Amino acid sequence: MTTRRQAVLACAASMTGFVAKIAAGSRELVRLSRVPGGGLQPKIAIDHQGTMHLVYFAGDPERGELFYVKSADGGTTFSRPIRVNSQPGSAIAVGTIRGAQLAVGEDGRVHVSWNGSADAAPAGPLNPDSGKPGMPMLYARLDDAGTAFQAQRSLMRHSFGLDGGGSIAADRFRNVYVAWHGIDQKEASGTGKEGEARRRVWIAKSPDEGRSFSPEEKAWSQDTGACGCCGMKIFADRRGNIYALYRSATESVHRDIYLLTSQNRGQSFQGRLLHKWDINACPMSSMDIAENADTVVGTWETGGQVFWARLDGGGSQPISPAGEGKGRKHPRLAVNQSGDVLLAWTEGTGWKKGGSFAYQVYDRTGQPTSDQGRMPGIAAWSFPAVAATRDNRFSILY
């Protein structure tokens, strides 16, 4: 009997690409395509030559596989898939925010991080709360030949309690940054703090394109906590500045969006509050950051609505798409060379539940344009991925 993984591989390998559908009324600015092989949780990165790099999930959502492909024509055709995780079944899709994270370095080397499954090796650090090893923050990079990924590694040494998803970034100076939120092993008890209030954002840095990583360090000294089941996003712009978005969990109810920035390549970070939200629950939300030549923008969810804003130059007021913000989640965005911003998000998705996605294009002044749409077809545990392509248009893969 053919397994789901075999079927995904066969489908992806046998197809040279997917016919892109042009959204009605979009003046062909936005192109919609399916992820190869029906993969879940796509993540896109565009390198300096305009090549599109894509990772996606396939298989059992609790213990599946990650695959990597690339495209030289904006997502019309893709290469044969390469499995990222060296141990079968060591990736996870459950929860939507714990899957693969992708970055491409200056020389085109591909870097991937992800939350390990319960079966993953190496296992995560011991969680003293449960007395059992937790899930690891795993990392792998493409080899020099570009034909296979090197063996996966866990980057957690001084923190435990990995829950929500981590993130990865690579700059033009050969540095790779992997970020996640967890609990300091030294602060496991005796601090008077409990639950998510103990969580901090941690960053492990590699100065040599991922060959080696220093032990993780706390990104910021302020005690904001971190929303346990939420994702985060770290990003390196073309000047080498580092940005990170995460959701706090101060007093368990202040689940605000914070921005961390570093202008010294991750040696130190400054933080500021971007958007407040008081809710005594874990919303399982995710964030995104993108740039063009002169603009860095970020997006997040608050109260069932999605928002975006400029993150550089002092920032800007958050902007949200028109219509009732009910059940909008997992926003993604891209910026083309004209400064137009594409914002996409899911609607109606939930635990083990698929839905649809919608998108809106904004001009460089932040005003919505007529380029917008809504499409069904988001599978459970998934979301769309977006990119600005070499021809100054946008691609959405779902």
Image (cartoon, helix red, strand yellow):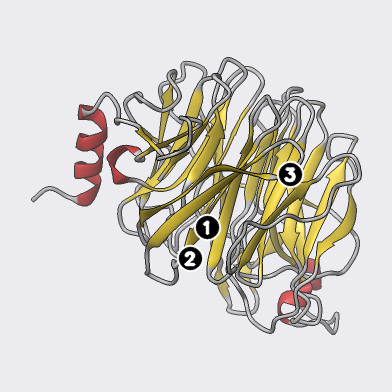
Q: Above or below — where is 39 with respect to 174?
A: below
Q: Residue at x 49, y 53 (%)?
A: 358
Determine whether label 1 and label 2 are within 8 Å by CB.
Answer: yes
Per the image, the residue denoted by label 2 is: 95
Per the image, the residue denoted by label 1 is: 98
Q: Is residue 2 left or right of residue 213?
A: left
Q: Position of residue 357 (x, y in %)?
A: 45, 55
Can residue 121 be seen here? Answer: no
Q: Above or below — where is 293 with respect to 281?
A: above
Q: Amino acid at mark 1?
A: Arg
Q: Amino acid at mark 3?
A: Gly
| Mark closest to the chain's N terminus, 3 or 2 | 2
Q: Residue at x 77, y 34 (%)?
A: 295
Viewer-nearest of labels 3 and 2? 3
Q: Position of residue 347 (x, y in %)?
A: 47, 63
Per the image, the residue denoted by label 3 is: 366
